């Protein structure tokens, strides 16, 4: 199993550490769709009992990243085209409204940080960094809204599609288009045009959905 192990035998938050490690491995694609999560093996890797592992897997199942199959136990969840469409439709509505609320409160620090993420994304030749930089760019702008519950929901939705988006950016050379769309969103935020930022964000998400679904279809 491709998973970074940590000795957490004396750590009070063992369940949280296991959860974070498993979540990271899933969204980055190190743990693939259908891969079993064997509690004994994971507990041994982290030098802990099965209890925090079981708790971590339960949290992952609540978020849709893991599902329980008969005879196989917990495995990494897949994503159907219908599920992907539903998640992206939801994100398009929610994220466009969040950035609309964020623009009037946008600080120079936020726009500066977002610009750094944007530039790092455009300059990076390492596909493994694109997913993190993409999320950092959007979340930096969204946080200015002050809508923490909305942010948590967006994070959960992103977790469900993140590994597929990372693959899509590589297979479809989608980073060039994402660069241009990110810059347009950033420009709208700097200009204080909340409606334009919202419209561009909505189009950015729906466009990514179409490209992803086309890529999945081509791959069968």
Image: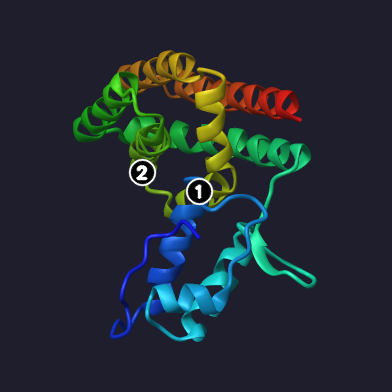
| Mark nearer the N terminus (1 vs 2) | 1
| Residue depth check, mark 1 versus mark 2: number of the one nearer the observer | 1
Q: Is residue 109 visible?
A: yes
Q: Residue at x 51, y 85 (%)?
A: 51
Give residue 21's quadrant in the image: bottom left
Nearest to the observer: residue 84 or residue 71: 71
Nearest to the observer: residue 178 or residue 43: 43
Give coordinates of residue 107: x percent, y percent: 24, 33
In this rendering, is residue 74 above or below 174? below
The residue tagged 1 is 27
Give coordinates of residue 152: x percent, y percent: 48, 54
SS for tag 1?
Answer: helix
Give coordinates of residue 197: x percent, y percent: 45, 22
Q: Is residue 79 left or right of residue 29?
A: right
Q: Is residue 72 left or right of residue 191?
A: right
Q: Residue at x 78, y 39 (%)?
A: 82
In this rendering, is residue 36 above or below 102? below
**Mark 2: few/some/many CA within 10 Å (<14, 14-19, 20+):** some
SS for tag 2?
Answer: helix
Name the quarter where the C terminus is drawn: top right
The residue tagged 2 is 143
Q: Is residue 149 visible?
A: no
């Amino acid at each position: 199993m491709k998973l970074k192990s940590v000795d957490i035998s004396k750590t009070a938050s063992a369940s949280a550490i296991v959860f974070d490690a498993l979540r990271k491995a899933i969204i980055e694609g190190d743990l693939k769709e259908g891969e079993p999560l064997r509690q004994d093996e994971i507990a041994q890797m982290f030098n802990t009992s099965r209890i925090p592992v079981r708790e971590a897997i339960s949290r992952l199942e609540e978020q849709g990243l893991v599902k329980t199959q008969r005879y196989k136990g917990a495995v990494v969840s897949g994503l159907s085209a219908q599920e992907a469409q539903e998640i992206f439709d939801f994100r398009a509505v929610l994220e466009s409204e969040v950035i609309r609320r964020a623009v009037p409160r946008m600080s120079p620090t936020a726009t500066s940080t977002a610009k750094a993420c944007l530039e790092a994304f455009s300059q990076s030749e390492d596909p493994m960094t694109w997913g993190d930089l993409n999320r950092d760019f959007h979340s930096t702008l969204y946080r200015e809204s002050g809508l923490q519950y909305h942010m948590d929901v967006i994070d959960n939705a992103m977790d469900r599609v993140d590994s597929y988006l990372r693959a899509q950016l590589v297979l479809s050379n989608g980073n060039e288009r994402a660069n241009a769309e990110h810059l347009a969103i950033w420009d709208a935020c700097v200009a204080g045009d909340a409606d334009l930022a919202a419209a561009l964000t909505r189009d950015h998400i729906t466009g990514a959905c179409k490209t992803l679904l086309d890529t999945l279809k081509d791959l069968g």
